[in-house]
Amino acid sequence: MDWIVPFGSTGLEVSRIGLGSGQIGSGDLDDAEAGRLLNAVIDSGVVLIDTARGYGLSEERIGTHVSHRRREFVLSTKIGYGVEGFDDWTPEIISAGIDRALKLMKTDVLDVVHLHSCPLDTLRNSGVPEALVKAKKSGKIRVAAYSGENDELGWAVSSGLFGSVQTSVNICDQLSLRQYLPTARQNGIGVIAKRPIANAPWRFSERPVGDYAEEYWVRFKAMDIDPGDFEWQELAVRFSAYAPGVCSAIVGTKNLSHFLENVELARKGPLPSELVERVLAGYDRENRGWLGQV
């Protein structure tokens, strides 16, 4: 199975695993260590780095530490909010957010720019998607994209406005995989899968009330999948990275060894078909109207 694959019909190519750089932006992470991690990720053969306006120091650190290697990776970010002097989710902030990201990441063009989980009414009535398309026509970005779930994602993949989407795809979150990715694939839309390890619910012996993983833990326990000879981490990574329609699955971490472990797991290729069928069947059996997790 190829490690580098086409990103839909965008003309870009991505690796089966990408870096989700939310934790790269943490103030708890030493700046020099962030730089070492970013460079090691590229050295490992990963060619997708995903960030966002809301990820702290992430964009700034990408610009500081790997802008000199810009030709070696596909750069993805998310915008729509948080630019001083502009109202959130307006056409004006789209232009301002792109200009800010270009400056911070020290690049002439952004490969993929997502609207970051904006509401359905914004998509339909604000002029925001059109502002993103205008930026593409101007050459500031290569691919106009949407990041989100549920009805908003359905609108995005059918709108004809977006060349890629980002959505939750994992063993505990299969709504997008079933309902929206077939249309995305048919329309040549590149797909980035987030949360490929489902927040690792197997870490907890009891329900982790209030933890980020709580909802996935509930689903994980209900599904009661037999993993056979596989460790959960490997099962989860390979399920998401090779799910139909997915081009790349992004893994976020501050720990380089953990990231490289996930890269090696994904390089093993797809899971055995009978194990994939057990995962799908477990979801179908226990699904209680589960929505995609934003």
Image (cartoon, helix red, strand yellow):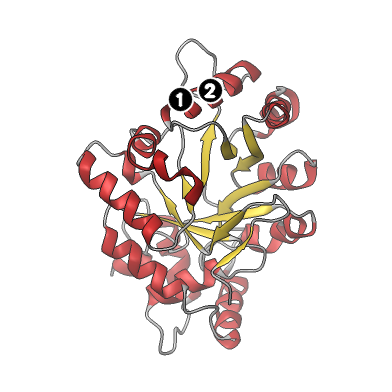
Q: Is residue 268 left or right of residue 122?
A: left
Tell me whether circle 2 and circle 1 mark residues in contact (CB < 8 Å). Answer: yes
The residue where tag 1 is placed is 103
Q: Position of residue 145 (x, y in %)?
A: 64, 41
- In the image, residue 99 sits, relative to residue 236, either above or below, namely above
Residue at left offset 26%, top offset 50%: 36
Residue occupying the point 47% across, 19% down: 83
Q: Is residue 186 visible?
A: yes
Give the number of the disc on residue 49: none
The amino acid sitting under disc 1 is: Lys
Decide: few, some or many residues near mark 2? Use Cα within 10 Å; few <14, some 14-19, many ≥20: some
Residue 22 left/right relative to 11: left
Q: Position of residue 51 (x, y in %)?
A: 45, 41
Q: Of the residues shown, which amino acid type is indicated by label 2?
A: Asp
Say what secondary structure mark 2 lies in. helix
Which residue carries the number 2 mark?
A: 99
Could you give the CA–CA distance between mark 2 and mark 1, rounded to whole angstroms? 6 Å
- Residue drawn at the location 62% of the way across and 72% of the way down: 284
Q: Is residue 293 above or below residue 54?
A: below
